[in-house]
Amino acid sequence: MGTFRVPIEIGDPQGQRYETVQALVDTGATYTTVPASLLRRLGIVPRTRAPFRLADGSLREMELGQTWIRVDGHEVITIVVFGDEGSGPLLGAYALEGLLLAPDPVGQRLVPVSGLLM
């Protein structure tokens, strides 16, 4: 379930060049999804394909890659889904966990969850 949008930076595989996009914080999505053209422009290549169940219940095979994501000064290497051009970026739960950030839907922001480290 999408809750609000935040700026995120998608980096090239070396973490040297980033592009900023507005991503929907999607607590119902496991993986972060980014339009395929942006990922390819940054030199990110698909590593594998996997089936995904979409919101309408259909099953679709999609490409997966790995790259850097940076949010509010936190950065992590994470798996990304090569998304359709017509859909906007989604920041999924897997990346949020790696970034040690959690959604605050009331404040419409991401908050650090350093308590997870204890």
Image (cartoon, rainbow, N blue to C red):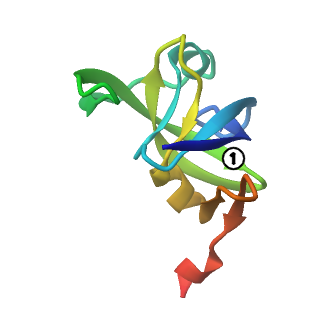
- In the image, what residue type sits under mark 1? Arg
In the rendering, at what x and y percent does residue 80 appear?
Answer: 47, 35
Q: Is residue 99 above or below residue 88?
A: below
**Residue visible at 63% across and 22% down?**
42
Q: Residue furthest front?
A: 106
**Residue visible at 54% across and 11% down?**
86
Relative side of 113 to 45, left or right: right
SS at mark 1 in the image: strand
Q: Is residue 112 above or below residue 103?
A: below
The front one of 77 and 112 is: 112
Q: Residue furthest bottom?
A: 118
Residue 16 falls in image quadrant: top right
Relative side of 5 to 117, left or right: right
Residue 73 falls in image quadrant: bottom right
In the rendering, at what x and y percent does residue 61 appear?
Answer: 25, 22
**Residue visible at 46% across and 21% down?**
83
Q: How many marks?
A: 1
**Residue visible at 50% across and 45% down?**
92
In the rendering, at what x and y percent does residue 1 appear?
Answer: 48, 43
Question: Label 1: few (<14), some or many (≥20) within 10 Å?
Answer: many
Q: Is residue 3 above or below residue 59?
A: below
| Disc 1: which residue | 70
Q: Quadrant of the C terminus?
A: bottom right
In the rendering, at what x and y percent does residue 49 appear?
Answer: 27, 26
